[in-house]
Image: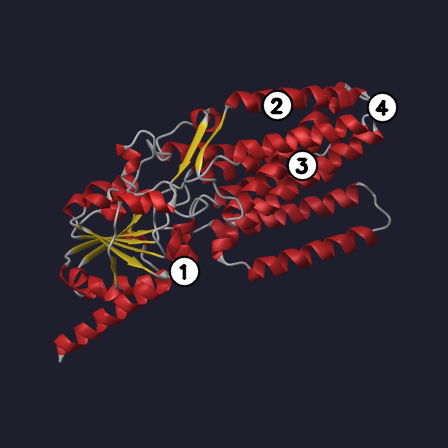
Amino acid sequence: MITIAYILSSIMFIFGVKGLSSSKTAHRGNMLAMIAMLIAIVITLLHKKIHDFSFIIASSFIGSTVSVILAKKAKLTEVSRIVAFYNGLGGAVSVSVALIEHYLTIREIQLNIIISIVLGLLIGMVTITGSLVVYAKLRDFVKPAPGVCEIKHSLHLLLFIVCLVFCVIISFSQTCGAYLLAFFVISSALGILIVIPIGGANMQVVVSLLISYAGFAAVATGFLLSSNIFIMSGIIICTFCIALAIITCNTMNRSLPADMLKSVKVTVLEDSDRNDHHKVIAHAPEDSIILLENAQSIIIVPGYGLVVAQAQEILHDLENVLTKRGANVRYALHPAAGRVPGQLPALLKEAKVSPNLLFATETINDDFQNTDVALVIGANDIINPAAKNTNTCLLHDMPVLNANKAKTVIICKRSLSPGFSGADSELFYNQKTLMIFGDVKDSVTTMVKFLKARAEEKEN
């Protein structure tokens, strides 16, 4: 009976993850995975024949209450941060279990236990620190320092080898307090150094990889606890997230090993350097009205700024106003837009934007050259021409939207600050670009207001 329940739970996990591949079935897939997890927890507790559930119930109640409160208060812009934070907690669980099993089995160690402990500790610590760095980056607590920072892959390899040496020592030593402390410091440094130089569109790949690490750590934990459901769910998470990372890399014309293992060079321009070479004229939202009125074809390029401003509803209103005037309005969605894959499509779906108006980069990119207006809402890196023109740019070789080929480009963003990669964009200073600074939602609201007012004047 126990085995059948575990098999049922595993099947539900598989179909739950499958459901996440489409926005239409994502909610159902999420619910299915939740039910599978609940079944696995209940069956495990019954199988272990636990007599006193007071501590388990109390801790579960506290954890569930905190999670529900955080989830209710979280905005869509904070989803990626929450994912990173919870992923770090998953790594912490694997480390805790590995430590407990190490001290419980210290006098009767077997090879399979040694391997599981080593993997649980190492991957768990890398997951914890890496996820916390991602969380700090998404909260803007950690930013690239001005200048150049190079972190060699050889340093990562050296730290990894040192970690393995300490893992072997810890596994066979009965008095390993000092070794354990040194191991934690080095493995934590490894997780930090792997993630901290990575920015821009690569953050999506990093998040996927860190979740796969947590899944791998869960597999090691499953072997330690002899839990088939732990092993199965960990394998599903690991393979799913690695596949997601590979797909994301492919959409950006990069390979996963090359992207993660190469030396990383981060260059950030100082504001003074930027201002010395370029001057930009700030426009008001109403300056774009005549251009939008006369445009027959408009491509809207949403970015993370749209997510931050929560401007999806008013942007949909602008789309409707322009469509009523006879313009052909479409949306260009870049796979790296937002902080996690699928964030922009989910946001636009929430605003009831027709799926027929949403186009992928490879589908719509050639149409920019025949487009009257490219309306960019809070996007930076995904429209940066330097990705194609400058070899030293951090975004080099990443496919970007050809917004610069439109007859006119209107860019709405809060300030002249560069995108997440720190790379400056020459498109901001192009003569055919109108830069509208300020809150994105307020800017689009003003556009809608003026367009509606002019439409009413013409009717009267």
Which residue is tagged 3?
Answer: 230
Instruction: Work out whether mark 1 precedes mark 3 in sequence or the reverse, and give the earlier one.
Output: 3
Residue at coordinates 68% horizontally, 44% vertically from top-left? 40
Pick the front one: 30 or 358 = 358
- CA separation in Å, label 4 and label 1: 55 Å
456 and 407: which is toward the camera: 407
Q: Is residue 286 above or below residue 413?
A: below
The quarter of the displayed image where residue 442 is located: bottom left
Left or right relative to 368: residue 107: right
Residue 20 image position (x, y, % from top left): 48, 45
Q: Considering only order in the chain, which callout, 4 or 2, is on the residue closer to the N terminus?
A: 2
Label 4 CA crowd tier, 10 Å (few <14, some 14–19, many 20+): few
- Measure the alpha-carbon separation of dots 2 and 1: 41 Å
In the image shown, does 391 or 402 lie closer to the viewer? 391
In the rendered view, would you say 341 is above or below 459?
Answer: above
Dot in front, 3 or 4: 4
The residue that disc 4 covers is: 174
